[in-house]
Amino acid sequence: MTFEKELKDHYFHGHEKYLRHISVDCVIFGFHDNELKVLLLKAKYAGKWALPGGFILKDEHLDDSAKRILKDRTGLDKIYLHQFYTFSDPNRSTKKINQQFLRNIGFKGGKSWMFERFVSVGYSALVDFTKVKPIADNISDACEWFKVNEVPEMILDHRHIFEMALKNLRLQLNFQPVGFNLLSKKFTMPELQKLYETILNKKLDRRNFQRKIMSTGILVKLKETKKGVSHKAPFYYKFDLIKYSKALKAGLGF
Amino acid sequence: MTFEKELKDHYFHGHEKYLRHISVDCVIFGFHDNELKVLLLKAKYAGKWALPGGFILKDEHLDDSAKRILKDRTGLDKIYLHQFYTFSDPNRSTKKINQQFLRNIGFKGGKSWMFERFVSVGYSALVDFTKVKPIADNISDACEWFKVNEVPEMILDHRHIFEMALKNLRLQLNFQPVGFNLLSKKFTMPELQKLYETILNKKLDRRNFQRKIMSTGILVKLKETKKGVSHKAPFYYKFDLIKYSKALKAGLGF
DNA sequence: CCAAAAGTGTTTAAAATACACCCATGC
DNA sequence: GCATGGGTGTATTTTAAACACTTTTGG
């Protein structure tokens, strides 16, 4: 099928495949260069950026819809996902955007499920930045990482959704395996600390952080140190998954 | 319109008024006799109990749908509401229940939006028990309060929804005005403590509790004491709303 | 006057914070 | 050899937990 045909099919027959009125939007977080980042798509024609999103198959759990979308945008399976809020402002209509979109590719319009109101369920995802190859979808020009403090203008209420996800991430830091999912298998203590500092948006004392995190027992210190740094080489650590998951149930206390 | 006609209209024309595939379920919490309680409806014919729920008008915010449902079941306006999770298991189908229901009132069935899959958005509500007059809806025999530790068998995944609400309430205790919404305007310190103990499901030290809660500055001690108790009369307190809301932003720390 | 439950204060333990010195590495 | 940032230890303050005696009220 050509792109145009595929799109026409989506607009005029998509409702046979997907649930009406419901969508999923994903806020994908990554951590790189000591910065928390979010993966965004540049919507064709609109010029603005958007959260990766999609629709729900008639017989699909929303968690699976989100997984499907994430797999498409990042190439990753088994991503850590968390549903954080459902957005239902009746004014968050995609009608104008979708009509504009159709006109731009040469359709006059008509009736489409895509012009109707959508309630969107927000998911946040935590991924290992180094493993992700951003892939744009067919209605997007680009797929890129942005620092969370420098997000560009976004369509609809996506800015709001993103901010809710970030707020939720802060609240959940002590109860979700945030570190494990955002960092690589092995990492240094300063890296982990930077992650906490970025998410909590405040400086932490290096020595107290180390003591506190080690006292939880969730980390295993490795023999290996980081190479090629022009100062004392930091050790690598990895998570003790069993202790980590136990500790999360009680909360880490940051 | 007669009841049967109203119902038939709902089953076969409701989709013209409401969004398809989306519903709202409310977990209404109250506090009475030093017990945390939840308000349930007894579904006609099914014999099992259910959370008060409803559908979303085509141009309505989900928050407003929930408010509408709560007003109908409790008679209260301005209820404290909190969206806590969206349930989307494709197997949580109301089809069988609704078909059974239709048969019971003498319809053969046919096609109806009510037989399709529903994604349900969970809201929890905190109400002043003393102000509520439980009102059954037209598909229910009864509307009653249950202690949260003694909930009866419930339809579909309502038990699961209820448990998620309770879990969420525990997590949110330090960040939402739980005490204010569950208690009357004035209350005694032991009442507030019992509320915390019930929600957290653990005993707290009377003296430390008093000190801790007073140190937050969220309470104002009144001159008045409780009358008619055969022991030293406890003082009444009320919330200092300005300090309360400020303190909640930082978290109360229980 | 007694049982029941509330008011108040002190002592102790634990946790968070603040802070200082030494160490390894690349340039 | 020096700038940079990491590793470790200790003293101090703050907060939480444990605990005991006195007070008021109805019966």
Image (spheres, coloured by chain):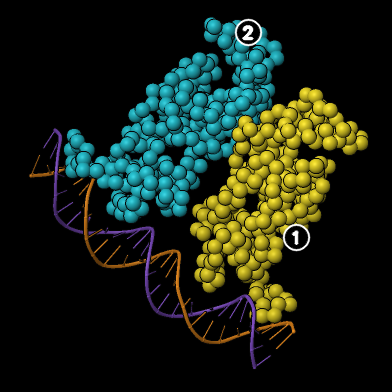
Chain colours: A cyan, B yellow, C purple, D orange
Give the answer, above or below, for where A198 lies relative to B198.
above
Q: Which residue lies at the image location 67% right of the left edge and 56% below the top edge? A: B150
Which of B100/B16 is in front? B100
> Residue A10 vs residue A187: left or right?
right
Q: Amino acid at mark 2?
A: Phe
For the residues labelled 1 and 2, say whether their Cβ atoms are less than 8 Å apart: no
Q: Which residue lies at the image location 67% right of the left edge and 11% below the top edge? A: A109
Quarter in which the N terminus of chain A is drawn = top right
> Residue B199 vs residue A173: left or right?
right
Indicate the position of residue A174 as horizontal and vertical percent values: 44, 48
Nearer the viewer's eye, disc 1 or disc 2?
Answer: 1
Callout 1: helix, strand or loop? helix
Q: Which of the labelled discs sits on residue B130, or is there none?
A: 1
Q: Which residue lies at the image location 76% right of the left edge and 47% below the top edge? A: B41
The residue beneath circle 2 is A107
Indicate the position of residue A5 as horizontal and vertical percent values: 58, 7
User: How many numbered marks have been drawn onto this rendered protein structure?
Assistant: 2
Q: Amino acid at mark 1?
A: Thr
Q: Which of the labelled discs sits on residue B246, or is there none?
A: none
Indicate the position of residue B65 as horizontal and vertical percent values: 72, 39
Residue that extends furthest to the right in the rendered view of this protein: B2
Give the answer, above or below, for where A114 lies relative to B2.
above
Label 1 packing within 10 angstroms: few (<14), some (14-19), many (20+): few
Q: State which chain disc 1 sits on.
A: B
Q: Which residue lies at the image location 45% right of the left edge and 35% below the top edge? A: A80
Q: State which chain disc 2 sits on.
A: A
Which of B116/D5 is in front? B116
> Mark 1 and mark 2: span between their CA atoms?
59 Å
